Image: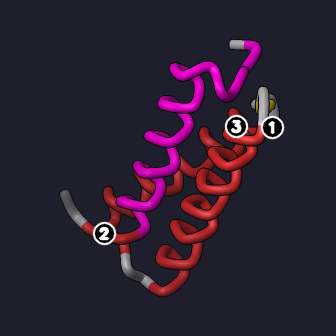
Amino acid sequence: MTEEQLKKETKKWLEKIEKKLSDVRSHDEKGEYFLKNINAYVSDSKHFLEKGDLVRAFEAVIWAWAWLEIGLELDKLESPE
């Protein structure tokens, strides 16, 4: 994967998760913990993207998605979709 492709993929997944997060709600305190971590990884991804550290930027957005999917699966988070 080229640098440009990696940057494009990272931006694509950042946009998708930010859109998805606008509809995600927590069920409890643990859900809030999940949301805090998801948002931290999204923020980290943007930071690394700005610094040109594309591998870490992509890795951070993937971690954000992992936290989101796990939170939904464990019923700590909810999303209308």
Give the residues in magenta: 57-80
Label 2, secondary structure: give it: helix
| Nearest to the observer: residue 11 or residue 22 | 22
Q: Quadrant of the N terminus?
A: bottom left
Image spot of residue 6 (x, y percent) = 33, 59
Q: Give the number of the mark in front: 3 or 2.
A: 3
Furthest residue toward left: 1
> Secondary structure under badge 1?
loop
Q: Position of residue 62 (x, y in %)?
A: 41, 49
- Residue 71 placement (x, y as % from top left): 57, 31
What residue appears at the point 75 percent right and 45 percent down from the top-left corner? 32
Query: Which amino acid type is marked by label 2?
Result: Val
Mark 3 vs mark 1, CA separation in Å:
15 Å
- Are the two marked residues, 3 and 2, in contact with CB atoms closer than 8 angstroms? no
Side of 12 where 40 appears, left or right: right
Of helix, strand and loop, which mostly describes the magenta segment? helix
Residue assigned mark 3? 31
Residue farthest along the front direction in this orientation: 29
Tag 3: amino acid: Gly
Instruction: Return the disc, 3 or 2, that comes first in the chain's sequence.
Output: 3
Residue 59 colored magenta?
yes
Question: Which label was assigned to residue 22?
Answer: 1
Q: Is residue 66 left or right of residue 24?
A: left
* Up/down of 50 relative to 64, above or below: below
Q: Is residue 23 left or right of residue 18?
A: right
Q: Earlier in the sequence, mark 3 or mark 1?
A: 1
The residue lying toward the viewer, choosing from 32 and 16, is: 32
Considering only order in the chain, which callout, 1 or 2, is on the residue closer to the N terminus? 1
Front position in the image: 8 or 44: 44
Q: Residue tagged by mark 2? A: 55
